[in-house]
Image (cartoon, rainbow, N blue to C red):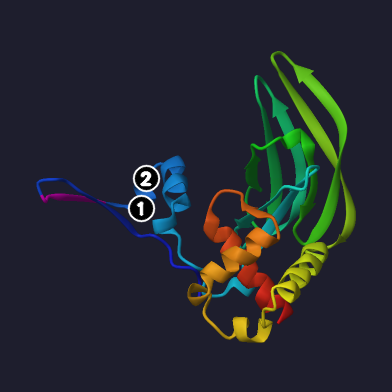
Amino acid sequence: MPRPRPQEITVKFDDGSMARAPFESLPDSLQFEIMRQPFACKASPNPEEEKFVLLEWDDGWREVIEVGPDCTDINRFYVISRVEHVGRLSINKQNGYPELIEVVRRPLDLKRIAFKDTFELTLERSDREGHKTDHFFSLEKKGKGFSEIITLFKQVVNKEGIDLKELSSKEPSEVSKQYEKIGRKMGLKAGWRQQDVVDFIAYLVKSVA
């Protein structure tokens, strides 16, 4: 069963009147911000079928981001420098344009990306044009998928005395607080919404149990 999708947004005024609009009629940026909010996040009914990208920095900071089901493989990573630095992670999709993930936190110091494979990043070249500079990174394959984070996950659940089979037998919504705790112990942060961390831990539970 796919993740529930928002259909409508309702605004209630202090006189009791209401206004409604189809969710897809909202600007993309507003849809994005609404879906980041905890009240609008629904747990995935099938976390083992979702796709995630794991980003890791040189200081050990890790962020997890859920991506679309039609994403296939990492395309490239580059950073645009104006006054600030903004990273762009491009992921190929089965059809149409690649999916772009904006990396705001210290993009020049991003160390590793994990998706279907794990890649280490190395600055390859920097091209200056006017008031901006584009930094392009090479991607060196260092392993399959989430092998390293799965090892860390197993270490954490063993240390905490967690029974994975028992955990996997429950609905993610029942154990979301426990998933959040595991995520904190692993040092995982949300790239753009907290539900992605919960769903990623549920994905790891289903993968390992």
**Quick check: 152 left or right of 65?**
right
Three-letter code, disc 2: Leu
Kindly give the residue lying farthest to the top in the view shown. 130
**Residue 124 vertical placement versus 72 (above, below):** above
Cα gap from disc 1 to disc 2, whole angstroms? 6 Å
Quadrant housing residue 59:
top right
Which numbered circle lies on residue 140?
Answer: none
Residue carrying label 1: 23
Quadrant housing residue 111:
top right
Which numbered circle lies on residue 26?
Answer: 2
Residue 49 visible (yes or no): no
User: Residue 80: x and y, percent?
Assistant: 70, 28
**Quick check: 124 left or right of 168?**
right
SS for dot 2: loop
Three-letter code, disc 1: Phe
Whether pointer 1 and pointer 2 mark residues with C-beta atoms closer than 8 Å, the reply is yes
Range covered by the magenta-colored residues: 16-20
**Label 1 crowding class (10 Å Cα cut-off): few <14, some 14-19, many 20+?**
some
Residue 125 visible (yes or no): yes
User: Residue 192: x and y, percent?
Assistant: 56, 48
Which residue lies at the image location 61% right of the left edge and 81% below the top edge?
167
SS for dot 1: helix
**Residue 133 vertical placement versus 95 (above, below):** above
